[in-house]
Image (tube, rainbow, N blue to C red):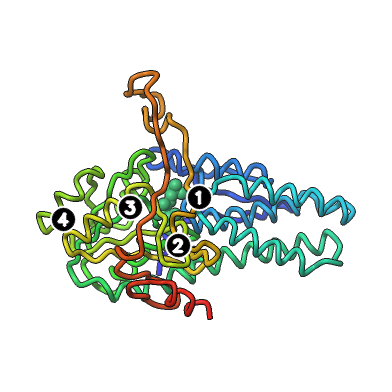
């Protein structure tokens, strides 16, 4: 299967190593890679959404740790450990909602602990190996989810998606868009309805771009058109990604997802969530306990240089919302499809 979009790439030339990430703040107008060589730099890339989407954030954070370790590798181990810990902390503070960030940092931390007595050079090599493993595993997981989820879509299905859960949000293939890609690759004629996804416009800028690149038919709508389209019988299924699923199956995803789920329920349309196991947080019992990021009011009052809202207006900008498990038809995971997810079914997934 071709992987059209390489969101993150590890570079190694003339003895120098660094990370490159597509600048997602400038797509689709400008396609450009930015270079990173430290944890601080990668954390800034995550915070400013150069890289975004839960799995991609996790992969970026893992590389952030590896980059920091490479920078510190000539230090005595005690100083190396102290400075690396600061790298972990700065990465952990970059964004709060996507649990993949903390999941990836935890894996890197375990790798660090496992090499307790190694010198800093050996440890930094091991950390880079672990980051590369997280990167390549993510593509495999997405392909497995794609295969599991494609069977849920019928030939000719018109599938609505919200935000961008595509190759750009992952190491490749995508979660929600990965299911669509896999269904198309299996010969089904699928068309996509992309919610614009205010205020950051991931749907208009990123999902639409990915689908146009691959010639998968895509129609862009503004977020407030979804109910109308469903009421007219123009949507057969909804597939979204997720940033964190609580132990009871509640799903945090991009702001506006809850609205789409309620509408889908009202119209009897299946609402699917593509969800790698790394996005399930068994330590959080219910969706209401998931930390929800609040972003800058400037994302709501305008876009780039254009300000349309009255100066001085009060603004809220929660970046995610929670869809209760009862509205989720199924979670699509790399271990298969979990219909009507609940606490018991999620526990079984990890047993
Ligand atoms: O704020 P973003 O763009 O990082 O939010 C992304 C989403 O909400 C995605 O739907 C989610 O991370 C799943 S990505 C496979």
The quadrant in which residue 181 appears is bottom left
Reading the image, the residue beneath label 2 is 245
Whether residue 167 is visible here, answered yes or no, is: no
Mark toward the start of the polypeptide (1 vs 4) = 4
Q: Nearer the viewer, mark 3 or mark 1?
A: 1
Reading the image, the residue beneath label 4 is 230
Label 1 Cα neighbours within 10 Å, binned few <14 / some 14-19 / many ≥20? some
Q: Nearer the viewer, mark 1 or mark 4?
A: 1
Reading the image, the residue beneath label 1 is 291
Reading the image, the residue beneath label 3 is 257
Report if the beta carbon of the residue with label 3 is closer than 8 angstroms to ligand 1. Answer: yes
- Whether the residues at callouts 2 and 3 have beta carbons within 8 Å, the answer is no
**Residue 60: image location, x then y, percent:** 58, 53
Label 3 and label 4: CA atoms lie apart by: 15 Å
Q: Residue at x 75, y 63 (%)?
A: 112
Report if the beta carbon of the residue with label 2 is closer than 8 angstroms to ligand 1. Answer: no
Residue lying at the far top in this picture: please name it: 311
Q: Secondary structure at mark 3?
A: helix
């Amino acid at each position: 299967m071709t992987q059209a979009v390489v969101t993150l790439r590890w570079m190694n030339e003339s003895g120098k190593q660094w990370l490159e990430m597509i600048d997602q703040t400038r797509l689709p107008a400008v396609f450009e890679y930015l270079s990173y060589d430290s944890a601080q730099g990668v954390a800034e890339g995550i915070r400013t959404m150069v890289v975004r989407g839960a799995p991609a954030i996790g992969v970026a954070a893992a590389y952030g740790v590896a980059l920091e370790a490479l920078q510190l590798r000539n230090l005595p181990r005690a100083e190396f450990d102290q400075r690396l810990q600061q790298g972990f902390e700065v990465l952990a503070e970059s964004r709060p909602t996507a649990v993949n960030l903390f999941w990836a940092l935890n894996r890197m931390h375990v790798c660090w602990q496992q090499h307790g007595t190694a010198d800093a050079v050996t440890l930094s090599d091991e950390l880079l190996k672990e980051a590369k493993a997280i990167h390549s595993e993510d593509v495999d997981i997405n392909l497995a989810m794609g295969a599991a989820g494609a069977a849920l879509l019928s030939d000719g299905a018109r599938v609505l998606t919200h935000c961008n859960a595509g190759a750009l949000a992952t190491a490749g293939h995508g979660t929600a868009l990965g299911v669509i890609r896999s269904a198309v690759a299996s010969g089904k004629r699928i068309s996509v309805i992309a919610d614009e996804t205010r205020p950051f416009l991931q749907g208009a800028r990123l999902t639409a771009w990915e689908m146009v690149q691959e010639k998968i038919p895509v129609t862009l709508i503004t977020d407030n058109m979804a109910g109308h389209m469903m009421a007219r019988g123009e949507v057969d299924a909804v597939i979204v990604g997720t940033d964190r699923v609580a132990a009871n199956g509640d799903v945090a995803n991009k702001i506006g997802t809850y609205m789409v789920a309620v509408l889908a329920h009202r119209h009897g349309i299946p609402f699917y969530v593509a969800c790698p196991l790394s996005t399930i947080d068994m330590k959080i019992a219910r969706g209401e306990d998931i930390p929800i990021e609040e972003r800058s009011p400037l994302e709501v009052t305008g876009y780039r240089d254009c300000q349309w809202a009255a100066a001085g207006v009060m603004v809220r900008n929660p970046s995610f919302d929670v869809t209760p498990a009862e509205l989720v038809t199924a979670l699509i995971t790399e271990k298969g499809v979990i219909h009507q997810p609940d606490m018991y079914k999620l526990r079984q997934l990890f047993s």
